[in-house]
Image (cartoon, coloured by chain):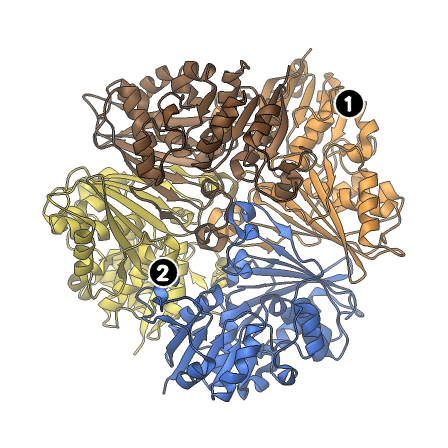
Chain colours: A blue, B brown, C yellow, D orange
Amino acid sequence: MTTKIAVLGAAGYTALELIKILLRHPEVEIVAVTDLHEGRPHVAMIHPSLAARLDLCVEKLSPAEVAARADCVFACLPHGVSASMVPHLLDGGARVVDFSADYRLNDPEVFAEWYNQKHADPDRLGKIPYGLPELFREQIRDAALVANPGCFPTSAVLPLVPLLKAGLIDSRGIVVDAKTGVSGAGRTPKLTTHYPECNESMAAYNLGRHRHTPEIDQILSTTTGKSVEVVFSPHLIPMDRGILTTTYSQPAGDVNEEKLLQTLRDFYAGEPFVRVVDHLPGTKDAAFTNFCDITARVVRNRVLTVSCVDNLIKGASGAAVQNFNLMFGYEETTAL
Amino acid sequence: MTTKIAVLGAAGYTALELIKILLRHPEVEIVAVTDLHEGRPHVAMIHPSLAARLDLCVEKLSPAEVAARADCVFACLPHGVSASMVPHLLDGGARVVDFSADYRLNDPEVFAEWYNQKHADPDRLGKIPYGLPELFREQIRDAALVANPGCFPTSAVLPLVPLLKAGLIDSRGIVVDAKTGVSGAGRTPKLTTHYPECNESMAAYNLGRHRHTPEIDQILSTTTGKSVEVVFSPHLIPMDRGILTTTYSQPAGDVNEEKLLQTLRDFYAGEPFVRVVDHLPGTKDAAFTNFCDITARVVRNRVLTVSCVDNLIKGASGAAVQNFNLMFGYEETTAL
Amino acid sequence: MTTKIAVLGAAGYTALELIKILLRHPEVEIVAVTDLHEGRPHVAMIHPSLAARLDLCVEKLSPAEVAARADCVFACLPHGVSASMVPHLLDGGARVVDFSADYRLNDPEVFAEWYNQKHADPDRLGKIPYGLPELFREQIRDAALVANPGCFPTSAVLPLVPLLKAGLIDSRGIVVDAKTGVSGAGRTPKLTTHYPECNESMAAYNLGRHRHTPEIDQILSTTTGKSVEVVFSPHLIPMDRGILTTTYSQPAGDVNEEKLLQTLRDFYAGEPFVRVVDHLPGTKDAAFTNFCDITARVVRNRVLTVSCVDNLIKGASGAAVQNFNLMFGYEETTAL
Amino acid sequence: MTTKIAVLGAAGYTALELIKILLRHPEVEIVAVTDLHEGRPHVAMIHPSLAARLDLCVEKLSPAEVAARADCVFACLPHGVSASMVPHLLDGGARVVDFSADYRLNDPEVFAEWYNQKHADPDRLGKIPYGLPELFREQIRDAALVANPGCFPTSAVLPLVPLLKAGLIDSRGIVVDAKTGVSGAGRTPKLTTHYPECNESMAAYNLGRHRHTPEIDQILSTTTGKSVEVVFSPHLIPMDRGILTTTYSQPAGDVNEEKLLQTLRDFYAGEPFVRVVDHLPGTKDAAFTNFCDITARVVRNRVLTVSCVDNLIKGASGAAVQNFNLMFGYEETTAL
């Protein structure tokens, strides 16, 4: 029996990647794609790459209409908008994978501080599983709503959690230097992502102010029981897709590279989408896949990790389908 | 004695490149830069690369105010706007290098047909030299106003004119297949030039409808005395700057590669900025320079030319300074 | 029952893409990958992106050893090498999809002229189907050996054949101006494909001398019954993957865009991997897919076609799997 | 009176950039370019961009022959090779700007440890000024030999020295996370710099083992009197040119952003090629210029600096000409 899918916010890159993955999924049917465009354009008018692959028109639909059609809703909506629609989708009986940040943070005050707005659905916060199956698989299976992680948090949390849990690194003073391709900035044209501006250039941005900071803090804190506050510095790199994250931490006690790598290997043994590698990975190795590649080094008594993900796949739409597979009882790797 | 310069439309890429070239010119002083920004921002707020290089604020000025300050005005304005300002600049005593298409075409009806607007200053058309010194050097020297060429026409006209004049190719049925970097599309963000859309992609655009078509036709026609109508097809290529133009024509009589190359070499002997080369040139050879590199081939009884320019330099701002040098009696190659 | 697969020449890009596609195929098992590396390295040592996806070592094997293990052999070998191995693979009972040019041309003298070597297996030439299912589907089904097409010929032949067959364009004087990403040049480092040389640059290469010329001529000639000789000019573009081919021909009789497009649509009705589109396609629309996107225009009484393929998928490994599916009775679109 | 220049190792990127800068210098004449090519090829055969700009052939010359012709020698040679030639150049009466690492480190044992070879000219070590005029201007003026800095050290040292000297940051535990364009890897084709490998990808490399590490340590130590050992991690980014370096340090005492920025501004007041900026700089701002752009931030009680240089200009050939200008008494900014 196929599962009926709706995709909200269909014009963006995460929706496009999601649809491409779902088209390979043998057990789903996409029954609705929504956006704010006027006049029900065919999806191929908005994403020419979907011509002859998905024969649907983009509609404006109410949450109730969506829930009436779909078993599972992927909400690729801006923060704030999601929290105003998700309750109605759940009320209508749909289960939801939410791509926005609205349900990732446990504390509405932290949300308000970083997103400059009051949360529209504060009572649910703290009860929604964070959609990183490597850490929260069991909670995800039964959830009606899953908060799909941010791309940077995925790349930062996966290498750090095992080392923190094993007591190999100090939870204080962790630096997360992340580099991302430009698709992470979304599909709305801006001067900073105008080709002749950002091509052949790189720059740091939002130093200390990026909204993924509290998300990284929260996952590192809740999974380790320590209060972690990272220094997070993202950089924009002239390429389409890929995040490479380099972290720097103080070792706790006696560590060496083999111990670090073995700890990571043990932690992720059996995980289908984490590859702990000896070499220094390049983002292209993981591009267009749901893999996160991780390695670790010791340099002058500092612990370094390097991790690579495709920001649109493991950092967004691939993770969403992985969560969906868990929620609906499919093989976790289906279509990925 | 230095020449006082004003740059109108300072926010775009051609103005930026122009300013960088003028900063190397020993005989000029930039006295005004204008744009539509509110509040007189420092030029480095708009172009960070100009920090510590040009200490001026961007102003809104009337043509009369500009002409009162400057000896020479470089007008980097949209079509239509130029023709409404240039007469006042000339009346005010300034000489003008105009980057727009407004004074390139001789016939106001052709202008109206391709630019969808009535020309604001039709009486001047046909009397303004086209700013390609290789073809119109003497007219440029004495001009009060010069029409700086389009980037594609420069790359198409320079290889074709000598072969047409020498009777080596047929004037009918010439195909001009041009490929351009993205800076040619200007600095206003649009979906087609949004990095994740155009990076790692290429596409043809405006086939048969590109506004540089009548400009190419006109120069080929007026310099050869024949009525030339080219098939012009531009393509957008994921790189910052550079145009590579491949032309295809029928030979007229008996031609071979050596004869083609020798004709080109003879025609451009002594020209400081045209390099006739034996190898197939790459756009990087001419990038960030005022050179146009040209070669020719015969393939299966068809004549091919390949030419490369930097669309922002020889295709725009470098040509403008070359014209300026001629107009004001400086060494033609100064600052180039 | 699964089909056992061997991949010869595993170190290159076409082999890598092929393996990625085959890993999604539910009915195959890759049983051998070969190359000239010493010491049986794991395939992930050569292609890090295959870590945790294919657990095989790269071996040196004789054709007989390969044929003993595999039902179908994909030979990603240089020209000349293929023709020396394929007969032994066939003798051993394997069926073969050959990526090289060795079995594409019908005439051993034409092969010798363009490839500067005597053909090692001339008696088979002319009897091997050309692996373009859109034109030769029935011959492919029963073949023991299929000649997988070159990337440029696929992009040139698919738009031109229907128009030639319908008598809408003249078979004489066709110009094929093709632009390709750099992966088409293979994986061996050379100065021309060294990043700082070819990035931010474009150039024509092998004008009139590219080895795909006789392949294009042959397919256009055999499918139309006319002797076609095209002017073929490839250009190297700074991007990973994608070919955009623009063709120029004389109309035969009275044509217009709608007639051209309708002819293409009719010809490819029901074809799973050809999309005839109204807009001007970009290569990114077809990237990482097996699609060929085609459109047509009339400009100043010249017929233009624009077509886009991913040179590594529809231009190589995707086509190979499409052929394999036909040969072994699987759904033609499986894994694609 | 012009100064006669020789460029050794002319085939590489630093030599090419150097020649382009020197061609704009009004007081120099390039009299010899050398390399190991056979047969005296014209320089335009090796660098097509120099056609019509420099009419010299590349020669094989002994140090004595070079010194007989040139007043100043720019040695763009591999490490080890420089130290075997420089003594003879100096003996011959030439002054030398050396691009290699051979004379940058004071201690021959440190050199041997990081470069895996015995130093060929150990007695000179410790007596040669490090060619960073912002720190060692007076020593450079009178030097017969200057050690031109590495590209990464320039980008790391310029932001850190003022903060260390002012006691605003702790000298222990400094992290230097650097990102470089691919031209930094030189002009010899390798798999890691093959376009389809490194395009659309990024990776860390030589973590803790990069040879610029001891150079950064030494300059930070000698200018501050403290023993500094940095954690240095370079990353390869898919772009031609540009280094962006992000550093992380512990504040020493009470710091804030304004104090950091003011300290940097005071330190570099009057420096022609350091721009201390409030915004986060992009590498494109400094590309093709001799500028180093610097800013600073405080994030969660950690001090961050971000600096940008063009690795081939301020990181190599521009710095070399700046040094040359100082050595020969020209205006320091000439041609830059």
Q: Is residue A20 visible?
A: yes
Dot 1 and dot 2 within a common chain: no
Query: Can you say which quadrant of the picture contains the C terminus of chain D?
Result: top right
Residue pointed to by mark 1: D144
Residue lying at 58% horizontally and 71% vertically, measured from the top left? A79
Q: Measuring 35% from the left and 66% from the top, which residue is drawn there?
A: A41
Taking depth in this image into account, of A157 and D254 the one nearest to the observer is D254
| Nearer to the camera, C207 or B67 | B67
Mark 2 crowdedness (10 Å alpha carbons): few <14, some 14-19, many ≥20: some
Query: From the viewer's perspective, is A195 left or right of A296?
Result: left
Find out whether the residues at labels 1 and 2 contact each other: C-beta distance under 8 Å: no
Left or right, residue A15 beside residue A101: left
Can you identify the residue that label 2 sits on? A48
Q: Position of residue A331 (x, y in %)?
A: 45, 82
Q: Position of residue B243 (x, y in %)?
A: 42, 36
Looking at the picture, which amino acid does disc 2 mark?
Pro
Location of the N terminus of chain D (image quadrant): top right
- Please tell me in which quadrant of the rendered image residue B116 appears: top left
Q: Residue furthest top?
A: D1
Where disc 2 sits, the SS reads helix
Q: Is residue C180 above or below residue C4?
A: above
Is B51 on the left or on the right of C213, as rendered? right
